[in-house]
Image: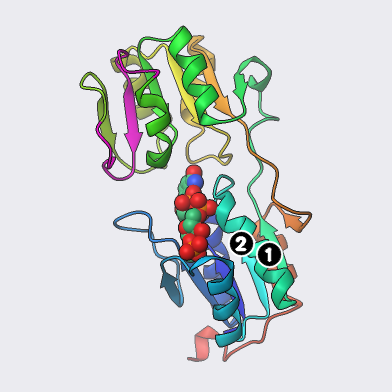
């Protein structure tokens, strides 16, 4: 195994599929954050490495010679560790990151904030019936400011913390269609959509609908990648980068 894909995203799965088909040696890594993860094609390991030191050990033990960090744009700790471990182990690192939504139509009118705490404050001041799609791990920052709001919360797995009694929790996983998102937003009577700049099309519908209905969008801005790194925005560009570094096994069709 020579290429380590840090995954948990659709891009990481698409990259694994393509590399497997081309016979490259790689392994995907998932944090193990969700109960039933969507597994990529090919070899997969699940669970934290144990910080930078653990990742360095893994790199040495598995003779990893390049990392593709295809984690979610908000998985900053893992990205920071990848940068440090790549430097310390003297191996190449590529960042594969889907473009954010800041260039999309309507973006100038959204309420951009720097973190979830600010998002909670801004939302509490303007909304009684917000629709929160910020991920399970950020919810603790909203429970206080939005304690009396009738929030609709969508998460992949049930939250592990106690939520205000008048919040409604919906467990599901995208992609979401335009029609189903529109019905959900209208049925709840959402007066604000709170989300983060994840980018991509899987979860875009709700924002387009909010803009169309004149519902405010509170958008948590991405933090910059923790270090200067070679960055690509598409799986095909990531494949070009890997092809220059990877050791091929027998092509998949002959295995
Ligand atoms: P994080 O805060 O950056 O990472 C926390 C710790 O989880 C890391 O220090 C690492 O533990 C472990 N970890 C994270 N990603 C890992 C991976 N791909 N393989 C092995 N260990 C990993 O990350 P997070 O926000 O909890 O996100 C976890 C995963 O979910 C990521 O892979 C990300 O792509 C995916 N995801 C995140 C979001 C989001 O909004 N944050 C949204 C969708 C998907 P050790 O220090 O022990 O190595």
Looking at the image, residue 19 lies above or below residue 101? below
Give the image location of residue 73, x and y in percent: 59, 46
Q: Which mark is residue 161?
A: none
Seen at 36% across and 19% down, the residue is 185
Looking at the image, residue 149 lies above or below residue 3? above
Seen at 37% across and 18% down, the residue is 146
Of 242 and 131, which appears nearest the observer? 131
Reply yes or no: does residue 155 show up in magenta: yes
Q: Is residue 202 left or right of residue 240?
A: left
Q: Is mark 2 within 8 Å of ligand 1?
A: yes
The magenta stretch is 145-162
Q: Secondary structure at mark 1?
A: helix
Label 1 sits on residue: 84
The tally of labels here is 2
Looking at the image, residue 107 lies above or below residue 245? above
Give the image location of residue 19, x and y in percent: 59, 74
Q: Is mark 1 within 8 Å of ligand 1?
A: no
Seen at 71% across and 67% down, the residue is 93
Residue 186 appears in the rendering? yes
Reply yes or no: does residue 185 show up in magenta: no
């Amino acid at each position: 195994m020579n290429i380590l894909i840090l995954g948990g995203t659709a891009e990481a799965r698409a990259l694994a599929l393509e590399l497997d088909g081309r016979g490259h040696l790689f392994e995907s890594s998932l944090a193990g954050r969700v109960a039933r993860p969507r597994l990529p094609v090919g070899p997969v390991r699940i669970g934290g490495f144990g910080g930078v030191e653990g990742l360095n050990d893994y790199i040495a033990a598995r003779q990893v010679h390049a990392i593709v960090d295809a984690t979610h744009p908000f998985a900053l700790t893992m990205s920071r560790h990848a940068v440090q471990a790549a430097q310390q182990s003297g191996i190449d690192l590529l960042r594969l990151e889907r473009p954010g939504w800041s260039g999309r139509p309507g973006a100038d009118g959204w309420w951009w904030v720097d973190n979830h705490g600010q998002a909670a404050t801004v939302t509490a001041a303007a909304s009684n019936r917000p629709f929160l799609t910020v991920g399970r791990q950020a919810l603790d920052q909203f429970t206080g400011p939005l304690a009396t709001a009738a929030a609709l919360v969508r998460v992949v797995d049930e939250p592990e913390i106690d939520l205000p009694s008048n919040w409604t929790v919906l467990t599901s996983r995208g992609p979401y269609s335009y029609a189903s998102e529109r019905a959900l937003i209208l049925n709840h009577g959402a007066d604000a959509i709170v989300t983060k700049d994840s980018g991509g099309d899987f979860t875009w519908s709700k924002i387009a609908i909010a803009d169309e209905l004149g519902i405010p969008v509170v958008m948590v801005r991405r933090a910059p990648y923790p270090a200067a790194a070679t960055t690509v925005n598409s799986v095909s560009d990531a494949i070009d980068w890997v092809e220059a570094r990877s050791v091929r096994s027998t092509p998949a069709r002959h295995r």
